[in-house]
Image (cartoon, rainbow, N blue to C red):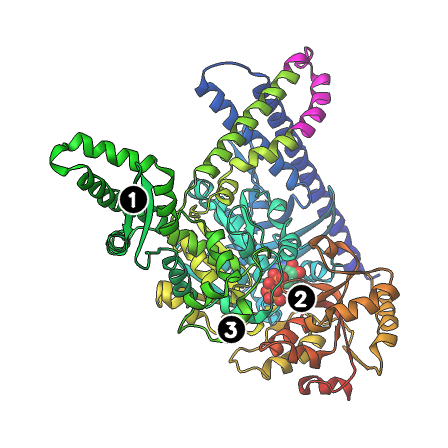
Amino acid sequence: MSHARGDRETVRTADLDAEQQYVSMLYDKLDAVRRETAQRLARTLRETGGTPQARTERDVSTTMYTDTLTQLSAVENGLCFGRLDLDSGEDFHIGRIGLFDEEHEYEPLLIDWRAPAARPFYLATAASRDGVLRRRHIRTRQRTVVDLEDEVLDLDAAHEGNDLGLAGEATLLAALDARRTGQMRDIVATIQAEQDRIIRAPMNGVLVVQGGPGTGKTAVALHRAAYLLYTFREQLSRRGVLVVGPNTTFLRYIGQVLPSLGETGVLLSTVGQLYPGIDATAAESPASAEIKGRLDMVKVLTAAMKDRQQVPKDHIEVSFDREALRFHRKDCMQARTRARRSRRPHNEARRVFRTEMFTVLTEQVADRLGRDLLDQRDLDEINTELRADPAVNKVLDDLWPQLTPHEVLSDLWSSPARLATATRKILDERERDLLSRPATAEWTPADVPLLDELAELLGEDDSAARAEQEREEREQLAYAQGVLHIMEQDEEIADEERLRVSDVLDAELLAERHEHRSELTAAERAAEDRTWTFGHVIVDEAQELSAMAWRVLMRRCPSRSMTLVGDIAQTGASGGAESWDAVLSPYVRQRWRYEQLTVNYRTPSEIMNIAAEVLAAMDTELSPPTSVRSSGFPPWVREIADPGVELGGIVSEEIAAVEGTVAVLVPSALHDEIGDWLESEVDSLVLGRTPEDLESSAVLLTVEQAKGLEFDSVVVVDPEAMLADSPHGTNDLYVALTRSTQRLGIVHTGTLPEALTPLAE
Ligand SMILES: Nc1ncnc2c1ncn2[C@@H]1O[C@H](COP(=O)(O)OP(=O)(O)OP(=O)(O)O)[C@@H](O)[C@H]1O
């Protein structure tokens, strides 16, 4: 070992020791804050009685302390991950939360990564130092500092710098090389400059983030949610932040990122979950989903609603007061016209229709009794009697019924006659057949925007939902009282030792309580309320959304404070986006901002080279992102004669060769058949049926299911069939090839798609 090297190692050990001391001090501080918060919570829970206002305040404090405790435990891993040394001689540490020294004028001990002071940690480069002399990445395992990476930002470094301008390259590569687990991790310690600019972009207006596969769009979107909540907490905690993802498997995959950053108040939802009370997951053909996503559906639904506003062919007769009472076509038409002209939603205009009808019917009865003998009081009485008459009400309900979105849509799909009327001149016979289905069928994700649209057209009677909410609030109160009761019974509660025991009790009770509590956060309340409008909406895989789905999201965000991340080249849904402009111009015209991400952090260059050939085969101007690293594993191709016999062995071999997760990606048309072959032959492989299946080390998925996910190894089966599977077959193949972080294999029987032929040579 040379002398110089020996010196460096000594410095390094000394540095490690110094950082360890500092980091240990931060953990002590974290423990102290936790203890203090737990004690405050225990005290609040012990308080009883008081005025309603005092009780409300107590409730608010309980929520606050519980949330703080949740946040404090979320930041345990990687509490501190960086340090900046400035020209001024100052230095400070950066971490997941801010910690302060109360005894020394609240001097910062740890700067929250979202605070403006932390920004140079992500942005400073040798060429643009922003007062930074040295950036240090601190890697920890549990509470131990295991490694340091220093970047001295001087001009020499500017010349040597890596091509992609990466910050903390060694730390970044270590993070990227780590095995995947089926759960996405946060990237707070290694956010790169192009990502940071997007994360901290101004909140207002629509921001579109276009980026190829693996460029960190999802990661950026989630860190942006955390950043916005930190920076605009007042504003956003009231209205909440909505994050929309393509399916529940994806939501499970990303579900831990925000909690690990200490944020729990964000509503994660698929489009199929955006209508309160419904979790639409039933399958349907891409062709019918595409039709349901067309903008023309607004016309269809309006026609379906109008079709429920009937008038008799000639007249309807009922007996009232032992005489015949007639509902004449002309009168009904007039009442209907007036009701429609009120421009109110159907269920509200119904009142106009009924008022009109009761007026004419009252006249009819009055004429029969002798108009001249009656005064206004008599007329009012007749009107009241008519309103109470069941037979009269039955006719009026038939002519202009109170309707729910569920009824209208279910009747529309299940009645060929209704469907024909509502889609006349809009859909052809074949398209109608695609939509037709039994009334008992479950809702599909594409139905949800239509239900939402109908709710707008019909106007809602939300009294049932409100009653349910009040019931829940009463339950929560009863629950809280139960907790207080238990705490009161514990006479020694004030004792330090006992407090720790009761902390355990609290933890269990509060976890349960928190479930109820969280329903009271803005995000959870929003989930129960269809008309809720969010402070900010983030859409991931935004290219997949249909025109009808965009209408729902725009209704949920009238302020148009939105971040939309996606990749036009990965559009899989028929009816998904062909261009961002086409999606957005109906809502904001040209007033949206566009950012691009260009570096691929997931897919190694060996794989990306081949994926780039597939991208080139698409009719797009997009260029492939540049891979940050290579894996050393060239993609392999195997041609087989009989997949039923050979595929099991190949997949088993790959699973044995890989440390980490393996995904077998198949065309959806072949999913069941291949699933049958593999299920019996490959023990460790699960057929991805539920979101939890992602946690298994090997999983079989369609491309649609794999969207947004990543695995250590991917085996793509029958790429030619993938191309033929949908109108966006090339996009699907591109998505499939780019899911891997290390290894890629391709198994085929017939021809290989042209873009992949270089692999077979
Ligand atoms: N700055 C970073 N530091 C560490 N890891 C990163 C960074 N940026 C991205 N990654 C990792 O790269 C992978 C890809 O990121 P992500 O899934 O967000 O990409 P994406 O653009 O949404 O991809 P796709 O469009 O293919 O779904 C993830 O494992 C993510 O954690």
Q: What residue is rendered at 71% in x and 22% in y?
A: 500
Q: Position of residue 564 (x, y in %)?
A: 49, 61
Which label's residue is closer to the chain start, 2 or 3? Answer: 3
User: Nearest the camera: 353 or 48?
Assistant: 353
Task: Find residue 544 and report its image quarter.
Answer: bottom right
Q: CA distance from mark 1 to mark 2?
A: 78 Å
Q: Which residue in the protein does label 2 denote?
A: 602
Mark 2 CB within 8 Å of ligand 1? yes
Circle 3 crowding by C-alpha within 10 Å: few under 14, some 14–19, many from 20 = some
Which quadrant of the render holds ligand 1?
bottom right
Seen in the image, is 51 located left or right of residue 590?
right
Pick the quarter of the image with the N terminus. Answer: bottom right
Q: Residues in magenta?
A: 488-509
Of residues 25 and 590, which is closer to you in this image? 590
- Secondary structure beneath dot 2 equals loop
Q: Main secondary structure of the magenta part?
A: helix
Q: Which mark is residue 431?
A: 3
Q: Residue shown at 55%/30% (left/top)? A: 63
Q: Of the residues under marks 1 and 2, which one precedes in the sequence?
A: 1
Determine the residue positioned at 56% across, 66% down.
Answer: 155
Q: Amino acid at mark 1?
A: Ala
Amino acid residing under circle 3: Glu
Left or right: 543 in relation to 717: left
| Residue lying at 58% horizontally and 70% vertically, measured from the top left | 286
Q: Is residue 75 left or right of residue 712?
A: left
Tell me the residue that label 1 is attached to.
324
**Location of residue 550 in the rendering, given as x and y in whole percent from the top left corner:** 45, 61
- Pointer 1 with pointer 2, Cβ within 8 A: no
**Side (left or right) of 741 relative to 324:** right
